Image: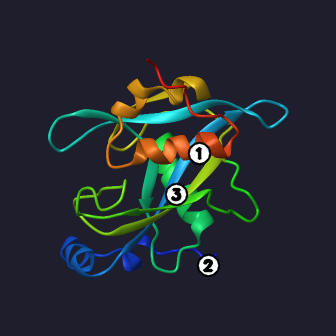
Amino acid sequence: MNQTAVDSHENWLTPDELAAARRRLPILYVNAVPVRVDDTGVATSVGLLLRSTPEGQIRRELVAGRVLFHERIRDALLRHIEKDLGPLALPRIPVSPSPFTVAEYLPTPGATPYHDPRQHAVALAFVIPVTGDCAPRQDALDLIWLSPQEAADDAVQKEMLGGHGIVLRQALAHLGFPPAPAVG
């Protein structure tokens, strides 16, 4: 048995414990921008999830989720990518993962460009190449692959809430794709 495996049942908070923690502590998250790359390592497409919000809106999102107690960042990335994209996504987590940005989500709208009405959350954001077959799972309704240019479009940004669009644009810049030119 792997002694370093995280026991998600023992280390996961109950709903009441999570609600209490969210009122008192920043919660650590990971954001993952899944990409397909060509043979030279250049990103050719970006994967975005389609989800329904509690209010019934349909929005695009990145792969995201909490880091469990005693869980390594790479393991959290693998767990959330598998949870959202399926077990055959085959993510290529770097040997030493380094986030391209840190996003601080606050429950107060406008305090930062990132908003999460539930909590104060700090998310480490990563670009993760995936090479396998992806299929949306859990509460994801769909997965769409867009070219980096399409992903930078303002229409896509409007489909994303809470700052995920900003993280996406930062990922595209990190990958060497400049922002879309302003129209008008």
Residue 106 location, x and y as percent? 30, 64
Residue 79 tag number: 3
Which residue, given by chain and number where applicable, does mark 1 sit on?
Answer: 171
Tell me the SS state at disc 3. Answer: helix
- Amino acid type at circle 1 is Ala
Q: Are marks 3 and 2 in contact (CB under 8 Å)?
A: no
Residue 17 location, x and y as percent? 23, 79
First reached walking from the N terminus: tag 1 or tag 3: 3
Residue at the far top: name it. Answer: 184
**Mark in front: 3 vs 2:** 3
First reached walking from the N terminus: tag 3 or tag 2: 2
Residue 4 tag number: 2
Quadrant occupied by the N terminus = bottom right
First reached walking from the N terminus: tag 2 or tag 1: 2
- Left or right: residue 69 versus residue 120 is right
Residue at (53, 41) in percent of width and height? 169
- On the image, which quarter does residue 148 sit in? top right
Mark 1 surroundings within 10 Å by alpha-carbon count, few (fewer than 14), some (14 through 19), many (20 or more): many
